[in-house]
Image (spheres, coloured by chain):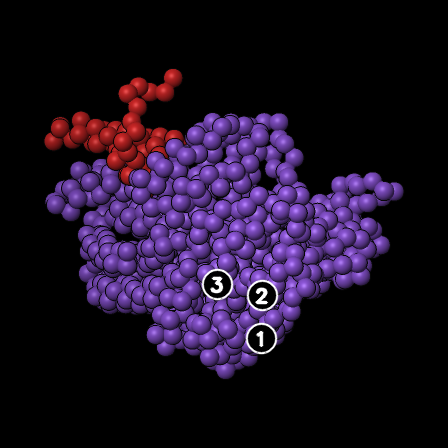
Amino acid sequence: MGAVTARPQPAAACPGCVVTPTEPVRPIPKDVQLALSLPTIHCQACISKVERALNAVPGVQSARVNLTLKRAMIQAEPGVRADALISVLEAEGFESHELDAGALSVTGSDKAGRELLMRLAVAGFASMNVMLLSVSVWSGATDATRDMFHWISAAIALPAIAFAGKPFFESAWSALRMRRLNMDVPIVLAIALALATSLWETALSGEHAYFDAALTLVFFLLAGRYLDHRTRAIARSAAQELSALEVPRALRIKDGAEQEVAVADLRIGDLIRVRPGGRMPVDGEIVEGQSELDRSLLTGETVPVYAEPGTGVSAGEVNLTGPLTIRASAVGTDTSLHRMADLVAVAESGRSRYTSLADSAAKLYAPGVHILSALSFFGWYLYSGDLRTALNIAAAVLIITCPCALGLAVPAVTTAASGRLFRKGMLIKHSTALERLAEIDTVVFDKTGTLTKGTPDLTNLSDIPREAASIAAALAGASSHPLSRAVTQAAEAAEIDAVAVADVTEVPGFGSQGLLDGKTVRFGRAAWVGAEQGAHTAAWLSVDGAAPVEFRFNDALRPGAEEAVSSLMASEKQVVLMSGDTTGAVRALAERLGITDWMAEALPQDKAARIIEMTGQGQCVLMVGDGLNDTAALTAAHVSISPATALDAARVASDIVLLGTDLSPIAEACDVAKKATRRIRENFRIATVYNVIAVPLAVAGLATPLIAALAMSTSSITVSLNALRLR
Amino acid sequence: MDVITYLIPISLFLGAVGLIAFVYTVRSNQYDDPEGDARRILSDEWDDHPKP
């Protein structure tokens, strides 16, 4: 695993970086490491199939699947591109997305997680040994034997806690320096007090020492910390590095020659060449060339827009058919794309308003524990006048109330819930996302790219004469325009072979034409073939002398969209459709899915404003969207979901990422989130019950190390078992 | 009670062995894919020899 890609771009989080032409990555003279996300794999057969398929690709040296992360790591020769591997896997029936391997190699080893695991291990092994000695003490060791056991326990416990408890010491110290209290302050205080009084007791050959309690405490708390870290590390590493290989470069034309420059170096007035398939790097005006533009990521419109010299273009639009030369009119932060990104900064994030259940519990808990322990110290000191007894009892109170179970209550549940959702293809990115998801009562969907695939589907193939379809398939096969690709796919599915058409040429912005038996055949825009443009998205085929044939298209629904919407409605949530697309297209989709509340031709500001308005009325909104025009709305919503195909900016703005194409897990996620929150509350209650039983004993001075150990372990284990019921 | 002088060092030693073994497994990436490893034993494609 020596070679790591020298790919310089980390996951692009800023929307400005989206605006880049899709240029091939420069060849790297070393072996490359590629990473693919495989959201649909789930069993041994999938592992073997994927590995076999990948290893069979020429140039691949080794491929290994990680089922836990649903990811494949591939070691390959420099020429191998991820797109090729993705299409190989698609042929095998697996969906896959490229992950940025350069960024992954940083998180791959997961240093922090490993460190936590080491500390957990040290605490675990030390507590086992100390517990062994403690059991002998509890079962009757006395005098010199007991003292020796205590001293050995101290010799194990002190260095072990010094090493294992470091995360708590650091966090408590940083909280205290800011003059705040967090959950770690009572923990550290309890550990320190327990160790100090136990050492003192041991030195005086006392009966009670709490070395085992201090160690098990650290062990359980570290277990909670580790679970928490692991859940979030998996989500973080996969979600943020799901980035397209887009290099922020553009082709500038200077003195008639093309020259590759960084997008940041472009100036107003520069002439820029944008090849078919590339994104507009800046705002500008077309000076040369004819083509069609896909504006769906910016506006949600599905129908490509015809573009010719004089047409204005915005950064982020995709050039579909012909090469274009544009003159830049706004660059960098002045582009309309950037203004849209600024909206995100203005919209107040739903996340920042939310206080997590754990935080609100800690706010009640930390001061309460300190007051209780201080009170019992002073009470006993005044009553007995003995500092040693008072200190012992204060330590016992702190240890027994120590939030072992509280520390496990939230992470155990979120780990179980995230694991369950991950198996369904959802990544929970934000730590409080599940709690917020449980509260929602309104779901807002974007249309293009979210409820629909964003790619057209041919709808009236059965009405088209077979001969016409085969001519259209021949003409469409030469083009990469979305409508042409839809025709090719539909023809393949219906097993219609393309006839041999000679001299097929693509006329950018209009369509394709060719010669069949000496007659000109054309497939393209209505006006170009001499037909009347209707209300639908359509392309027309004309054979010289005959009436044009209409090919109608519909934006295909994403799999699971209908189930998701209907089950959300069944659980009495208000479902809203907001799109930047035309009224007709939005209405048709809303009627198809049974959504009564819809909004068409919505600008990004409108979407965010509507969500803020709904929030103002006390509704908790879940936003599901993928485009740049959704980012402000995603940020403003209480909680947000975006599909893996979404733009970087949208994925960064959302709390949960859907890995697969299927939308149906959304409804299930809401249920799981509700159950998870219920479990968290139950866990808090269980932990409280244990405290209610054990604290009076501790305050009364009746608690022994044995009772402390029992209370602590049973409450932690019950809480974890309760969390496991979610799986 | 003489037996304690042997047993305590032995128990400490065994604990240390367990800890070292665990540290070794963490260092050699054996916890990176628990789910996949659990399923790989069902694979039909096994090796008769270790890879050269």
Q: Which residue is mark 1?
A: A583
Question: Residue at 44% across / 34% down in the picture?
Answer: A54
Q: Determine which quarter of the picture holds residue A72.
A: top left
- Residue A655 located left or right of residue A7: left
Q: Which chain is purple?
A: A
- Residue A667 located left or right of residue A586: left
Q: Which residue is mark 2?
A: A537
Question: Residue at 41% across / 45% down in the picture?
Answer: A94
Secondary structure found at label 3: helix
Q: Nearer the viewer, mark 3 or mark 1?
A: 3
Q: Give the Cα separation between the discs numbered 3 and 1.
A: 26 Å
Going by the numbered disc 1, the residue's amino acid type is: Thr
Q: Nearer the viewer, mark 2 or mark 1?
A: 2
Up-down relation of residue A370 to residue A272 (above or below):
below
In primary-sequence order, the first of circles 2 and 3 is 3
Q: Can residue A597 be seen?
A: yes
Secondary structure found at label 1: helix
Label 2 marks which chain's residue?
A
Picture coordinates of residue A412, whole percent (x, y)? 32, 55
Secondary structure found at label 2: strand
Question: Residue at 58% across / 30% down in the picture?
Answer: A79
The residue positioned farthest toward the bottom in the image shown = A617
Count of marks placed on residues: 3
Q: Which residue is mark 3?
A: A463
Q: Determine which quarter of the picture holds residue A401.
A: bottom left
In primary-sequence order, the first of circles 3 and 1 is 3
